Image (cartoon, rainbow, N blue to C red):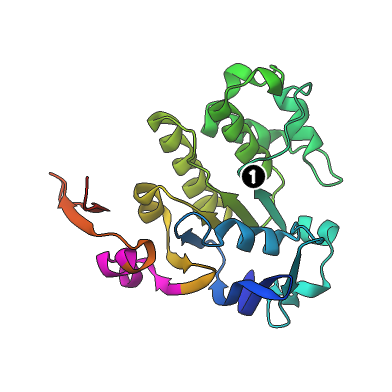
């Protein structure tokens, strides 16, 4: 059973589509990365999956969208939370909670899995501040804690909105390796909205390129992560560079 299947998936703002007819499939233990310019609809798409759209302004059309084989429209937020978890760009910060208490608070009606908690603390290298209050953490430190708390919920699908934002190079490596570990060892599937091309390319099995709420390209990494697709999506030129190890990288041509 595919964890996620979308067809003709749209989000409307006062009857005007801001996400239009998105189609994708997410397999078990697969990483799908969303790439696109600011305002292209990446975060809105993630919110539509999680059920956290602002219902006063936005509405979802998803009669052919399925989560774990059941129509997405049949899920309320509580039911979705048992199958999906998400970390958005501006998560709620309960500043008086310690890091450990935040992990405990994040569990959907169940006790914190202590061995898993210890595994996550080790992977994300957050042991030194698990007893500190959230309000004392830097943005990057809290980002790692929020990702860890999401992974501790043991859902089969995790949505991450800009997980590498505000992280230093070492922390990006730690987060990237943690995502890869959960994909390979625990068969977790991820949908990741990103602007970091290096980590996007390193992690993705599939890409969905978005522009103005519409799909520009969708498919496996080797087929669609190309200079032509990037230029079409972002509207600027890209150049290809080779590292000494033979790895190929694409960068904006003006750099």
Horizontal side of residue 135 vs 45, given as left or right: right
Asked whether 26 or 95 is in front, the reply is 95
Image quadrant holding the N terminus, namely bottom right
Location of residue 220 by image quarter? bottom left
Q: Is residue 80 above or below residue 114?
A: below
Look at the image and tell me whether residue 1 can be seen.
Answer: no
Q: Based on the picture, tell me whether residue 227 belongs to the magenta stretch.
A: yes
Q: Nearer the viewer, residue 121 or 247?
A: 247
Name the residue at the left extreme: 244
Q: Is residue 40 visible?
A: yes
User: Could you say whether the residue bearing mark 1 is in a helix, strand or loop?
Assistant: helix
> Is 212 included in the stretch rendered in magenta?
no
Left or right: 77 as drawn, with respect to 249: right
**Residue in the image at 79% along x and 34% along y:** 104
**How far across and down, in percent of the image, does residue 201 sit?**
36, 55
Decide if residue 122 is on the left or right side of residue 10. Answer: left
Q: Could you say where residue 236 lies in the image, as x and y percent from the top left? A: 29, 59
Q: Which residues are magenta?
A: 216-231
Q: Position of residue 45 (x, y in %)?
A: 62, 63
Callout count? 1
Snapshot quadrant of residue 65: bottom right
Residue under label 1, please give it: 151
The residue closer to the viewer here, 166 or 37, is 37
Question: Toward the viewer: 185 or 177?
Answer: 177
Query: Are there few (<14), some (14-19), or many (20+) residues within 10 Å of tag 1?
Result: many
């Amino acid at each position: 059973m595919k964890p996620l299947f979308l067809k003709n998936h749209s989000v409307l703002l006062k009857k005007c589509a801001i996400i239009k007819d998105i189609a994708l499939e997410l397999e078990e233990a697969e990483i799908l990365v969303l790439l696109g310019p600011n305002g292209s609809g990446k975060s809105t798409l993630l919110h539509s999956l999680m059920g956290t759209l602002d219902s006063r302004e936005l509405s979802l059309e998803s009669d052919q969208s399925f989560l774990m084989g059941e129509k997405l429209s049949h899920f309320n937020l509580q039911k979705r939370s048992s199958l999906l978890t998400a970390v958005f760009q501006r998560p709620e910060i309960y500043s008086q909670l310690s890091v450990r208490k935040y992990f405990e608070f994040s569990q959907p009606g169940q006790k914190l899995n202590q061995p898993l908690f210890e595994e996550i603390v080790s992977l994300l290298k957050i042991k030194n501040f698990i007893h500190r209050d959230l309000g004392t953490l830097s943005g990057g430190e809290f980002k790692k804690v929020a990702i860890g708390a999401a992974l501790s919920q043991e859902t089969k699908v995790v949505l991450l909105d800009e997980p590498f934002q505000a992280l230093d190079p070492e922390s990006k490596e730690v987060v990237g390796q943690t995502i890869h570990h959960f994909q390979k060892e625990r068969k977790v599937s991820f949908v990741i909205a990103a602007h970091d091309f290096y980590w996007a390319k390193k992690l993705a099995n599939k890409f969905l390129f978005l522009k103005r709420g519409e799909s520009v390209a969708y498919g496996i990494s080797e087929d669609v992560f190309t200079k032509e697709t990037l230029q079409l999506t972002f509207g600027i030129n890209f150049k290809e560079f080779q590292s000494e190890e033979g790895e190929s990288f694409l960068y904006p041509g003006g750099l």
